[in-house]
Amino acid sequence: MIDVGARADRTTAVFERELGTLARNRLYPLLAVGFAALIVAIALGSDVSGYVPLVATLLTPIELLVPVLVAAMGYRSILGDRERGELDVLRTYPATREEYVVGVFLGRLVAITATVVAPLLAVGVAVPV
């Protein structure tokens, strides 16, 4: 019988490890700051007078930049662990491959979502001002 609670605990452990890995890496905060600066610069550079014009202004850049951002942040996430020898250490733990992959995916998903949503919220809050 599969213990769902234990599987969730192991996936959560991998998820937290992945968030720690992203926090230690210098590239990901740099990508987040660059993305935020670009979105804010586009929004401030255009003369928008409401939410609809702002959405129309940001739609194309977001459509182009988000896939690039996702590729940059997700690129070699598991292969990098293998090259650094971390997978050999992780194999000694009771986490299965599926739990590991789901944990890594969720960690990257949270980081990417925060990277995309934070500047959009900041620009959205700035519209009435």
Image: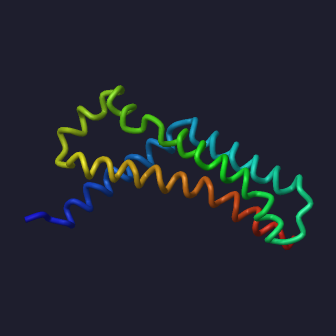
**Residue 62 drawn at (x, y percent):** 68, 53
* Number of numbered discs overlaid on the protein picture: 0
Give 15 or 96, whichever is nearer the viewer. 96
In the rendered view, does 73 fall on the left or right side of 49? Answer: left
**Residue 7 drawn at (x, y percent):** 22, 59
Q: In the rendered image of this protein, does residue 50 appear above or below residue 92?
A: below
In the rendered view, does 30 fall on the left or right side of 80? Answer: right
Please give the name of the residue rendered at 47% of the width and 54% of the height, measured from the top-left corner.
109
In the rendered view, does 35 fall on the left or right side of 103? Answer: right
In the rendered view, does 50 fall on the left or right side of 15? Answer: right
Please give the name of the residue rendered at 50% of the width and 39% of the height, measured from the top-left corner.
24
Q: In the rendered image of this protein, does residue 2 appear above or below residue 99?
A: below
Please give the name of the residue rendered at 7% of the width and 65% of the height, measured from the top-left corner.
1
**Residue 32 drawn at (x, y percent):** 63, 46
- Here the colouring is rainbow
Residue ranking furthest to the right: 47
Please give the name of the residue rendered at 60% of the width and 53% of the height, measured from the top-left corner.
115
On-image quarter of the C terminus: bottom right
**Residue 70 drawn at (x, y percent):** 54, 46
Q: Quadrant of residue 57?
A: bottom right
Q: In the rendered image of this protein, does residue 121 appear above or below residue 107?
A: below
Give 43 or 93, whichever is nearer the viewer. 43
